[in-house]
Amino acid sequence: MDLLLRSEHFNGLRKTYALHVIGRDIVIVSDPAEQSLIYKDSSSYSINGSIDMIYKCVGEVSPDAHKNLWHGPEDGFKSLHPNPKGQVLVHMGYSLLHKQLLQPNKSQELIQKNVSYVEQYTGSGAFFETSVLASSGQGDQVVSLHKWCLEVLIESQTRIFFGKTFREIRPDYKTLFDAWDFNSWMMTYQYPHFLAKAATRPRDALFKALTQYLDMPRDERDRESVPFVNELQDELENGGLGSEDIARVLFVILWGVNTNVHTAAFWLLAHVLARPTLAEALMEEIAPAMRAIEKTDSKDPAALTEIVRTRLIQDAPLLNATFDETVRTCSTNASTRDVKQPVSLGGKVLNPGTVILMPQRPNLLAPEAFGNHAGDFDPHRFLQNKRLTRQEFFRPFGGGVTLCSGRTVARYEVLTFVAFALWRYDIKVVGEGERVQGVYGKEFPRLDEAKPSLGVAKQFEGDDVIVVLRKKTTQ
Ligand code: HEM
């Protein structure tokens, strides 16, 4: 960063800064009203620069694939799907994901699979390789909360997209994903490769496993997956990409899909477990839903999901308010846009090529929107004032054309997991300095605000909540 060009106040609330970084002007816009104007104006602002950067620097697709991804109908690209807006290949890929996440019947299929897998993976005997740190043999298991959230939720999402096949190809894929996720900032900061091995090694192993999956004949892949991956593969092959490059594109998309859900669940549970009266109130609130689930055939995903929808998503206000407070206090997301045509912002003209960065954290923690104790975690905040989620200061899922299309799915995933975890297990936090079965407890995890995130910030690597889980026998 070599020059701070200007600094101004907007509405007396937030500052907008312009920086000149490696030959580019970057304008940082924090004022939520200014951000709204930018989010709405997709003819003056584009997201293509950030998409391009992520496929170049994170996916590192080949130069040929990179060219093909930006081909539109005028370059001879003919999509396999209706393309009335004349989108380029890379945007058609996102359209396929949007179809999967937003078309009612398709998103319903995805949510039902998720609810059903989370139900299975929170059952007894369903722990995976790395969550359990010690086991007493009498039912007490010492567990890493971070890894439990990761293993249940990433296993579930991966099975949704690939069936059981991906796990068979690379059984340790969740450990690789975790290592990548903690170190991915090295790639977004464009570290040279020899300094970024902690990120590139797990990433490259995942590229390889994804390529192997894509090279498998379709009839050898588990068919329980949703159609998105096959549809994306067909579309990208049709656009001229080989399986290695398709794996890289898929990796970038799946990173975005996976990273936030288990991290949000981790923070939500960490905050609940640190507040026993909140945990009790939540248990009381979810009891009718969980009792109804216990009376339902667990092999009927539609029936399970209907109970989750009507009783946890629509009728558990404290649980939902705790989710909203979690994403408010733990998110460090920022949207980026490129200026496409000369545009006036705050009385100054911005030239094409200028990069706009819209950080959300200052707004999510703004006292003028959330009160004097905006920095504190208050699970009742959104319960007391339901309008808080509708204001411009609350954008944990971004906005405009990059508004998270998985936000409803995410709420289902996190709330279902949290409800099953609390309902099925007595969970005791091992305090800092305490030792259970040879495992030491830890202090409350610290949010790593300094590293770039795709939404919810991670904890510092190594920070965790160590818990003892005991399966409840009766409720
Ligand atoms: C608590 C969980 C989640 C959080 C906090 C979250 C947050 C975000 C944020 C901040 C963005 C970027 C917005 C921007 O640049 O303006 C985003 C984009 C996106 N998210 Fe999420 N996300 C979550 C879960 C999910 C899930 C479960 C899926 C899919 C199953 C998903 C799919 C996407 C996609 C596809 C985008 C790109 C924008 C679009 O085309 O929709 N997200 N998310």
Image (spheres, rainbow, N blue to C red):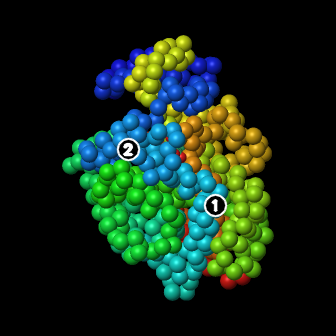
Does residue 148 appear in this view? no
Most distant residue in the bottom direction: 137
Q: Position of residue 471 (x, y in %)?
A: 62, 79
Quadrant where the N terminus is found in the figure: top left
Q: Is mark 2 within 8 Å of ligand 1?
A: no
Marking on residue 464: none
Q: Contact (CB < 8 A) between labels 2 and 1?
A: no
Q: In the depicted view, which residue is nearer to us: 203 or 182?
A: 203
Residue 282 vertical placement versus 366 (above, below): below
Identified at 45% across, 67% down, the residue is: 162
Of mark 2 and mark 1, the one earlier in the sequence is 2
Does residue 234 appear in this view? yes
Q: Which residue is mark 2?
A: 77
- Please state if 360 lies on the left or on the right of 336 as rendered: right
Residue 138 vertical placement versus 114 (above, below): below
Amino acid on which the number 1 mark rests in the picture: Asn
Most distant residue in the left direction: 194
Q: Secondary structure at mark 2?
A: loop
Q: Which residue is mark 1?
A: 105
Amino acid on which the number 2 mark rests in the picture: Phe
Q: Position of residue 324 (x, y in %)?
A: 65, 49
Identified at 26% across, 45% down, the residue is: 64
Identified at 30% across, 41% down, the residue is: 67
Q: Position of residue 392 (x, y in %)?
A: 65, 34
Q: Secondary structure at mark 1?
A: helix
Q: Is mark 1 within 8 Å of ligand 1?
A: no
- Please state if 267 lies on the left or on the right of 440 as rendered: right
Q: Single out the mark in the foreground, 2 or 1.
A: 2
Label 2, label 1: how far apart the Cα atoms are: 29 Å
